[in-house]
Image: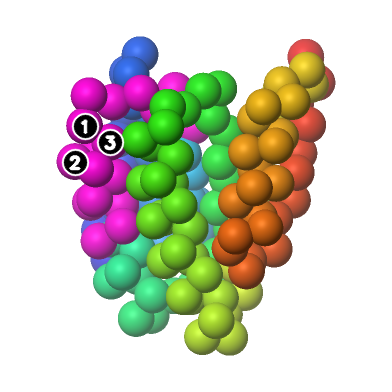
Amino acid sequence: MEPIIIEGTPKTPTVRFDTKEGVFEIKGRSIPENSVEFYKPLVDWLNKYKQEPLPKTVVSIRLEYFNTSSSKCILDVFKQLEAIHKAKNEVEVNWYYEEDDEDMLEAGEDYESIIRVPFKMIEIVE
């Protein structure tokens, strides 16, 4: 599968979905003009990926901030990962949050309570 590599902008996150390296990463700010348009290729890519996933899929989410419309799209990404996990493949989400960012920690915990995939909450101490 061809990797998805999107350079981040002030409004959109950096994305790296690469099966060769086993790297699945979303980081930065997610406040795109059209969240559905930005995230749809990621959801579609994961939909294909789940046909033949790697033995272990590790996804790192390191967002500084995301808006409400992005949160729904991120949930769609997680639903694809949940389907991979339900098919008896190992999936792990590393959710990074800044040391004092209670909102980002809670957002990760909220996703973890909705999606049946193991989450690791990782505090970034600067």
**Residue 9 among those drawn in magenta:** no
Left or right, 102 with respect to 86, comes to: right
- Residue 21 visible here: no
| Labels 2 & 1 near each other (Cβ < 8 A) | yes
How packed mark 3 is, by other alpha carbons closer than 10 Å (few <14, some 14-19, many 20 or more), is some
Q: Quadrant of the C terminus?
A: top right
What is the secondary structure assignment of the residue under circle 1? loop
Is 125 or 76 nearer to us in this picture? Answer: 76
Left or right, 49 with respect to 103, comes to: left
What is the secondary structure assignment of the residue under circle 3? helix
Task: State how far apart marks 3 and 1 are (Cα).
Answer: 4 Å
Name the residue carrying label 1: 34
Residue at horizontal 28%, vertical 71%?
48
- Residue 113 image position (x, y, % from top left): 67, 58
In the picture shown, does residue 70 fall above or below 80? Answer: above
| Labels 3 & 2 near each other (Cβ < 8 A) | yes
Task: State how far apart marks 3 and 2 are (Cα).
Answer: 5 Å
Q: Quadrant of the N terminus?
A: bottom left
Q: How many marks?
A: 3
- Residue 66 image position (x, y, % from top left): 46, 27
Give residue 35's mark. 3
- Residue 70 image position (x, y, % from top left): 38, 36
What is the secondary structure assignment of the residue under circle 2? helix
Image quarter of residue 31: top left
Amino acid type, callout 1: Asn
Name the residue carrying label 2: 37
Look at the image and give the residue range highlighted in magenta: 27-44
| Labels 3 & 1 near each other (Cβ < 8 A) | yes
Amino acid type, callout 2: Glu
Amino acid type, callout 3: Ser
In the picture shown, does residue 72 fall above or below 93? Answer: above
